[in-house]
Amino acid sequence: GITRPARLLGFQNFIPPFARARAPREVLRGVNFASGAAGIREETGNNLGDHASLSQQVTNFGNVVQVMLRYFRGDASLLNSYLGRCIFFSGMGSNDYLNNYFMSNFYTTSSDYTPKAFASVLLQDYANQLAKMYTMGARKVIVTSVGQIGYTANNNTGNNSSRCNEKINDAVSMFNSGLKRLVQRFNGGTELPGAKFVYLDFYKSTSDLYRNSSQYGFEVIDKGCCGVGRNNGQITCLPLQQPCPDRRKYLFWDAFHPTELANVLLAQSSFSTQSFTYPINIQQLAMS
């Protein structure tokens, strides 16, 4: 998530959600456009109810830009200079696999596309939306790869003795490879002049946490701290549920999401080192 990297960048409070941050002075402190279950594709996450897809989130960003323009008294040049110093964080793609492609009882995408073809259409749609953000003023953009979601507690609820669903990991690897190439393309200078894109390799960093879990202090890596069903991994944590007594020992908070400690470690590894970032880290992007 964005919370921990934002803290490392100096933000003292949570970045307010789009639904609440409307006044010009408020949006200058940042806006969180994220929407639960949302994906790159419009239909992704429909099984979980209403949400704002990536295209809607980008539209919402455009609306905020117009609010900011009023604050800058209509001076587009001054606004663009301000936006050029802002950092944009986009972590899309996971739901397109978990709540779309690999949910064949609700979606047809797995029969409509091979994993390679699905990654291709996702990347095309993603590239279009990132380019729209650029036209609205975004210049410093962080994009994250999809993590090794075959390792989540949700994938440890079946009868298979394996802790990992390599079919899912193989599919998202195709998307991740294409996303890194997209970052290289956008940083080339001709298509989006002045753009600075950073690729955060969550696939490798989440694998590092999983494979070296004991070194990071995790004792439980195949169960959620809070949830429903086998390994607390079939349904996410619900109201009034009793979580585990010590969440710092757990890699996963619920069926899909890492615990706070895991998020802290993921943020630290991408902030000031280049172990899992390309071509620079977050701190270098902020200072550039």
Image (spheres, rainbow, N blue to C red):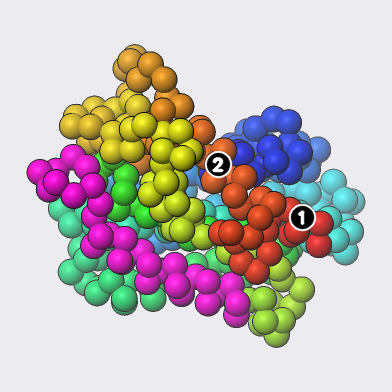
Identify residue for label 2.
265
In x, y percent, where is residue 260? 51, 32
**Majority secondary structure of the magenta segment?**
helix
Residue 23 appearing in the image: no
Between 162 and 139, the one nearer to me in the picture = 162
Amino acid beneath label 2: Leu
User: Was residue 229 drawn as part of the magenta stretch in this picture?
Assistant: no
Question: Looking at the rendering, which quadrant does residue 17 occupy?
Answer: top right
Which residue is at a point 44% across and 67% down the rendered structure image?
Answer: 176
- Dot 1 falls on a residue whose secondary structure is helix
Q: Local crowd at mark 2 within 10 Å, few (<14), some, or many (≥20)? A: some
Residue 176 appearing in the image: yes
Amino acid beneath label 1: Ala
Q: Which residues are magenta?
A: 156-185
**Which of pointers 2 and 1 lies earlier in the amino acid sequence?**
2
Quadrant showing the C terminus: bottom right
In x, y percent, where is residue 218? 41, 34
In x, y percent, where is residue 134? 67, 67
Identify residue for label 1.
286
In x, y percent, where is residue 139? 72, 65
Q: Residue furthest bottom?
A: 190
